[in-house]
């Protein structure tokens, strides 16, 4: 497809282009995605089948239905081996392996083994809301329980529910 502006004919290079976030955008060409910086230079090749915009200095990427992350240099910080993934918050990103969720750190290392029912939610580095064996609790970055896994549900703002009663948990 071509576009004409005042007799100037230009071929489309990309099928889609996202907005720039932190000086980087994703671009699509056919079935594959890559990332580009503001100088319009590609920082990755067209190798990803799914991507998300950069958030907190990292972008989630997928190839062959497995997920991982790249940094702002386009370097994969971990192998693309996860069934699902969510964006980084407060130094951790939820990843799924074999139907269970864990957390990796910004170096791509496993910070919390996949033992959680749902993606853990980092309110801050030392207040991570998790669900394990059908009960909810809060852990810190040292893997210690701040609030035990005894709640029926905990919202992202720290409201916990247990046996029909509501409790406000403090994000310490």
Image: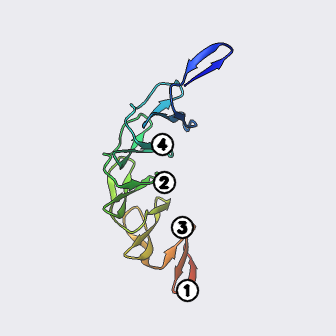
Percent from the top left, x then y, of residue 65? 35, 49
Categorize mark 3 by other alpha carbons within 10 Å: few (<14), some (14-19), many (20+). Answer: some
* Residue 172 % position (x, y): 52, 67
The front one of 15 and 84 is: 15
As measured in the structure, the alpha-carbon distance from the residue carrying label 4 to the one carrying label 3 is 24 Å
Q: Is residue 33 visible?
A: no
Left or right of 150: which side holds 171? right
Judge the density around disc 2: few (<14), some (14-19), many (≥20) Cα neighbours within 10 Å. Answer: some
Task: Determine the CA span between mark 4 and mark 2.
Answer: 10 Å
Q: Are marks 4 and 3 in contact (CB under 8 Å)?
A: no
- Compared with 21, 151 (above or below) is below
Label 4: which residue?
57
> Is disc 2 in contact with disc 1, using a CB cutoff of under 8 Å?
no
Question: At 35% from the left edge and 40% from the top edge, which residue is drawn?
Answer: 76
Q: Nearer the viewer, residue 85 or 136?
A: 85
Asked if labels 3 and 2 touch by Cβ distance under 8 angstroms, the answer is: no
Q: CA distance from mark 2 to mark 3?
A: 15 Å
- Foreground residue among 106 and 126: 106
Q: Which residue is mark 3?
A: 171
Q: Report crowding for label 1: few under 14, some 14 to 19, many 20 or more residues within 10 A (C-alpha).
A: few
Q: Nearer the viewer, mark 4 or mark 1?
A: 1
Outermost top residue: 7
Residue at the spot 57% in from the left edge and 18% down from the top edge: 10
Q: In the figure, residue 74 lies in which quadrant?
A: top left
Q: Is residue 35 visible?
A: yes
Q: Earlier in the sequence, mark 2 or mark 1?
A: 2
Where is mark 1, residue-wise? 164
Provide the secondary structure element on which disc 3 rests. loop
Vertical relation: 88 (above or below) 101: above
**Secondary-structure class at tag 1:** loop
Structural distance between the alpha carbons of marks 3 and 1: 22 Å
């Amino acid at each position: 497809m071509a576009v004409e502006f005042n007799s100037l004919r230009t071929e489309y290079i990309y099928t889609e282009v996202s907005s720039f976030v932190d000086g980087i955008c994703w671009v699509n060409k056919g079935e594959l995605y890559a990332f580009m910086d503001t100088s319009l230079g590609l920082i990755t090749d067209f190798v990803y089948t799914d991507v998300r915009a950069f958030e907190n200095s990292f972008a989630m990427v997928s190839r062959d239905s497995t997920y991982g992350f790249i940094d702002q240099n386009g370097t994969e910080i971990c192998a693309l081996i996860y069934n699902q993934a969510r964006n980084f918050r407060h130094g951790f990103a939820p990843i799924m392996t074999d139907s269970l969720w864990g957390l990796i750190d910004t170096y791509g290392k496993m910070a919390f083994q996949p033992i959680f029912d749902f993606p853990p939610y980092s309110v801050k580095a030392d207040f991570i809301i998790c669900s394990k064996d059908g009960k909810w609790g809060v852990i810190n970055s040292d893997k210690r329980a701040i609030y035990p896994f005894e709640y029926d549900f905990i919202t992202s703002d720290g409201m916990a529910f247990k046996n029909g009663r509501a409790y406000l948990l403090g994000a310490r």
